[in-house]
Amino acid sequence: MKKHRINIITLGCSKNIVDSEYLMSQLDKNGFEVFYDSPEGADTVIINTCGFIGDAKEESINTILQFAELRTRGKIQNLFVMGCLSERYRDELITELPEVDEFFGVRNTADIVEKLGGQYIENDPGRFLSTPSHYAYLKISEGCNRKCGFCAIPLIRGEHDSKPIETLTEESRLLAANGVKELIVIAQDTTYYGVDLYGRRRLADLLKELCRIDGIEWIRLHYAYPSGFPDDVINVMAEEPKICKYLDIPFQHISDSQLKAMKRGNTKEETYELIRKLKTKIPDIAIRTTLLTGYPGEDEEDFSELLEFVEKMKFERLGVFPYSEEEGTYSANNLTDNIPYEIKQYRVDKIMSLQNNISLEKNVNMIGSIQRIIIDREEGGYFVGRTQYDSPEVDQEVLVKSAKNLIPGMFLDVKITSADDYDLYAEVVQGPL
């Protein structure tokens, strides 16, 4: 018999999604009735928070306050808070939010299970997927050894801690057996994978093992750090057909003075050389990057270099954020946040305006081409899918005119018929693959 109903609310990044899925699996195996992002009828609500930047922290606090009111009114029996915000600000939260029954950090899954009266199952690779059943995130390590000036992640998540290749392949086989066709490889720094366990970077070896798993059709690589990018990873991406010709690699900036101030560990010349290598070995690669503007000391010349970088490289996917000071980081402790918010936002808007034009140009050039896509869902009279060049939730989509016999998780070929800056429209040219 089920013990009681537990609802998990997950905020923040894909790493948090995986943490929640591990917790849900543990609770499910202990006989609890588990569901996510739907508070109706829950006895216990667990909020997995984000504490990375100001907006994310505000969302987390507002969500906690929403459920704290329900707790006060007796609508739920227990309210737990876990994750990054709880890890970083536990003492302050305990004082300010007495309605919350318990706060847990980022590595306290076992404590949560036991607090609810369950028994934690050691080394269990099980997952309770909250994503659509045909794709899943595979978190290959925890923490980060980088000391980027603006980033609080090492303060929250600790040092880099890789999972063994055998553990990850077992987890991936279980995911494949349950219908997962696309693995999205994530970590705080995927390219550093293996150094702590094996004495060297072994991301390429891991990718090769994942390619051997029956049922997995696409493998997508996120959050690759540019400094010291392993050449063998480029080779594997070029050679293995299951690996999407897609790379999420946050460059943050291109000006040497800004890269040095940010403590990124690479230079402008090294950045351009890495992109040249990637595009030479993998001519059709789609690169997603993230940029940061308005960092302390960024002058007009630095920003001009950043604009030129975007114009020259014509990234397929790009996001840009204004700098916000995070307590405890190098920049907060040692630099003056001397760029007014209005200038930061102007620079963000300038970059995104340029990127919109680049994206539209690239999409228009795809009209008439045949693309293999995976269907994610049906919505608004369209089947919505993605090419290998697009990751779920963050990238553009392909909208296919309503057709018969299409279901989520299905691969098929489509012809691109029209485009706008962040969406493609298509029609089916070949049946399911």
Image: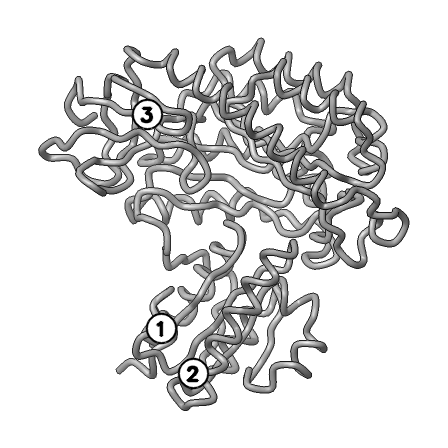
Q: Label 1 sits on what residue type?
A: Pro
Measured Cα–Cα span from mark 1 to mark 2:
10 Å
Instruction: Point out residue 113 in the picture as x, y percentages from the top left corner.
Output: 49, 76
Q: Secondary structure at mark 3?
A: strand
Residue 411: which quarter of the image?
top left
- Dots 1 and 2: beta carbons under 8 Å? yes
Q: Earlier in the sequence, mark 3 or mark 2?
A: 2
Measured Cα–Cα span from mark 1 to mark 3:
35 Å
Residue where numbered disc 3 is placed: 424
Vertical side of 42 occupied by 169: above or below: above
Q: Earlier in the sequence, mark 1 or mark 3?
A: 1
Residue where numbered disc 1 is placed: 39
Q: Quadrant of the C terminus?
A: top left
Closer to viewer: mark 1 or mark 2 = 2
Q: Secondary structure at mark 2?
A: helix
Q: Nearer the viewer, residue 358 or 276?
A: 358
Q: Residue at x 80, y 38 (%)?
A: 262
Residue where numbered disc 2 is placed: 70
Q: Residue at x 40, y 45 (%)?
A: 136
Mark carried by residue 200: none
Q: Name the residue furthest front.
A: 342
Is the residue marked by circle 1 packed among few (<14), some (14-19), or many (20+) residues within 10 Å? some
